[in-house]
Amino acid sequence: MKKNTFGNRLILSPYIVWSAIFIIVPLIIMVYFALTDVNGTFTLSNMADIGKYKKAFLISVIYAAIATVITLLLAYPMAYFMTKLKISSQRMLLLIVMLPMWMNFLIRTYSWISILANTGLINTFLGKLGIGPLKLINTPGAVILGMVYDFIPYMILPIYSVMSKLDNSLLEAAEDLGSNAFTKFRRVILPLSRPGIISGITMVFVPSVSTFYISQKLGGNKTMLVGDTIEYFFNLGPDYYNVASAISLVLMVLILICMFIMNRFSDDEDGGVII
């Protein structure tokens, strides 16, 4: 027993060291800067000034919520459709879903500029039809579109993972009891796929609310999210690290609260999100 315990600890030691260096230590540094001033003296003034940036927090939450809802509406039928195909077809669609994730995140986001720009693909096509150019880039819609495009695989995959494990006998039993297609979906499919939905919502909302590159490239200077605010202060130099850390700390707490709430609606089944 002792040998097995020692062996398990030995196997886990690289992960523990990695977590300590790249997760715990940065969090400690962030908390230190958030609760001190430029001279290293303890202060709560940084936290008290968070109210100045409430607009950035509010816009970030609204955009992330809209992007999450749109992503869910697109991903759920896609995941359900995938489960109805042959195994070979499912694997092919999974490959297609994951293929964009193999490319650099910055490249994927930057490519939308050439699509949405005034001289981009869409406006060029509309121009040949005598329409436009339309204002597509540097708009809130462009930012939300970028979020949906970049994070939709994180919604499809957990929902598909749960749906692919649904017991068909439950669906057959519902049909035998007189359930139509809508009732079967509402009473059987939707409740059983809830862990995947909760997991997908969390995996999309969290990176959406903290993103900054998407808003910079697709929203321009008109869209200032909380991630942009944090980056802005860090770029100003060491004198502003304390303010940026305070905003980061509040954002992390808000994300943890959201994840806790999501877990309250989930369970311990596969696909759920457990903190």
Image: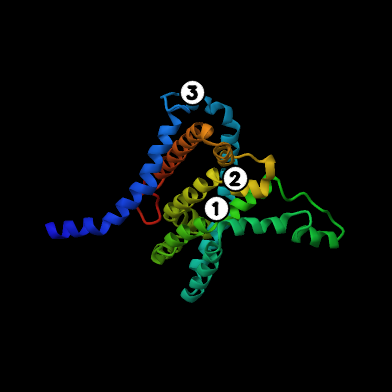
Give coordinates of residue 66: x percent, y percent. 59, 45
Q: Is residue 37 above or below residue 58?
A: above
Give coordinates of residue 93: x percent, y percent. 53, 69
The tag on residue 45 is: 3
Query: Label 2, on which residue?
Result: 66
Is there CB contact under 8 Å for labels 3 and 1? no
Q: Nearer the viewer, residue 178 or 61?
A: 61
Q: Nearer the viewer, residue 252 or 94?
A: 252
Q: Nearer the viewer, mark 3 or mark 1?
A: 3
Q: Residue at x 55, y 36 (%)?
A: 237
Q: Nearer the viewer, residue 163 or 206?
A: 206
What colour scheme has been applied to the protein in the rendered image?
rainbow
Is there CB contact under 8 Å for labels 1 and 2? no
Q: How far separated are the C-alphas under marks 1 and 2?
A: 10 Å
Mark earlier in primary sequence (3, 2): 3
Q: Residue at x 48, y 53 (%)?
A: 200
Mark earlier in primary sequence (3, 1): 3
Q: Is residue 183 above or below residue 205?
A: below
What crowding class fits label 1: few (fewer than 14 Cα within 10 Å), some (14-19), or many (20 or more)? many
Q: Residue at x 40, y 50 (%)?
A: 273
Query: Label 1, on which residue?
Result: 72
- Badge 3 marks a residue whose secondary structure is helix
Give coordinates of residue 258: x percent, y percent. 46, 40
Task: Examine the rendering and report whether any part of residue 274 can be seen.
Answer: no
Q: Residue flagged by tag 3: what amino acid is it?
A: Ser
Give coordinates of residue 194: x percent, y percent. 44, 52
